[in-house]
Structures are given as structure tokens and as C-alpha cells.
Image (cartoon, rainbow, N blue to C red):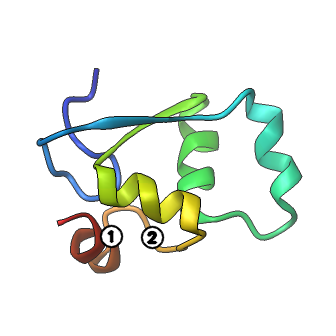
Amino acid sequence: MAGHCELCGHTAKIQVHQIRGLADLDRLGQMQPDWAVLMARKRRKTLMVSPPGHEGIHDGHEAAPHGSHWRARCG
């Protein structure tokens, strides 16, 4: 429903990144990626992302939400 990538702000071709439950975020270990921190802060199991941003999440790229790295990666 956001209509834009929650990592970089782009509005084209939005995908949904989903986890089974918020408790799954704890399984990632003590250092959570920034996208997981964002999901935990919003208390949501889904995150609206651009295709490159979604790929970055699954590839293990960690960067600050709305940071220049995500803009470059998602753009």
C-alpha cells in the first residue's frame, strides 16, 4: 500500500518482501540488517521494495534504509 520502495523511494515495479513472522527477525543473529530493523520498527511482516532492492535483501546486502547505497542499488 506504500506505493513506493521503502528502501529507496522509487515508485515503479514495487514488490513485496515478506517474512513468516516478526519472530523470524530474531533468528538472523545479534546484528540485524537494516531492512530487518526497519520491519521490526514498523512491526510489519512485509516491506515494499523495488526489484533491485528485493534482490539486495536476498543477496545479503546490508545498507541503511533511504541511504545512498540503496538509492544506487534500487535505482
Residue found at x 31% / y 51%:
51
Q: Is residue 22 above or below residue 75?
A: above
Quadrant of the image occupied by residue 69: bottom left
How far separated are the C-alphas under marks 1 and 2?
Answer: 7 Å
Q: Nearer the viewer, residue 14 or 4?
A: 14
Q: Is residue 29 above or below residue 4?
A: below
Are the two marked residues, 1 and 2, in contact with CB atoms closer than 8 angstroms? yes
Residue found at x 62% / y 52%:
36
Q: Is residue 58 left or right of residue 69?
A: right
Q: Amino acid at mark 2?
A: Ala
Q: Amino acid at mark 1?
A: Trp
Residue found at x 23% / y 76%:
72
Residue indicated by mark 2: 64
Residue indicated by mark 1: 70
Q: Is residue 38 left or right of residue 19?
A: left
Quadrant of the image occupied by residue 28: bottom right
Mark nearer the viewer, 1 or 2: 1
Q: Is residue 58 left or right of residue 20?
A: left
Location of residue 31 in the rendering, given as x and y in whole percent from the top left corner: 77, 70
**10 Å neighbourhood of mark 1: few (<14), some, or many (≥20)?**
many
Location of residue 5 in the rendering, given as x and y in whole percent from the top left corner: 27, 46
**10 Å neighbourhood of mark 2: few (<14), some, or many (≥20)?**
some
Location of residue 2 in the rendering, given as x and y in whole percent from the top left corner: 26, 28
Q: Nearer the viewer, residue 42 or 35?
A: 35
Look at the image and tell me in which quarter the N terminus lies.
Answer: top left
Residue found at x 37% / y 58%:
53
The label on residue 25 is: none
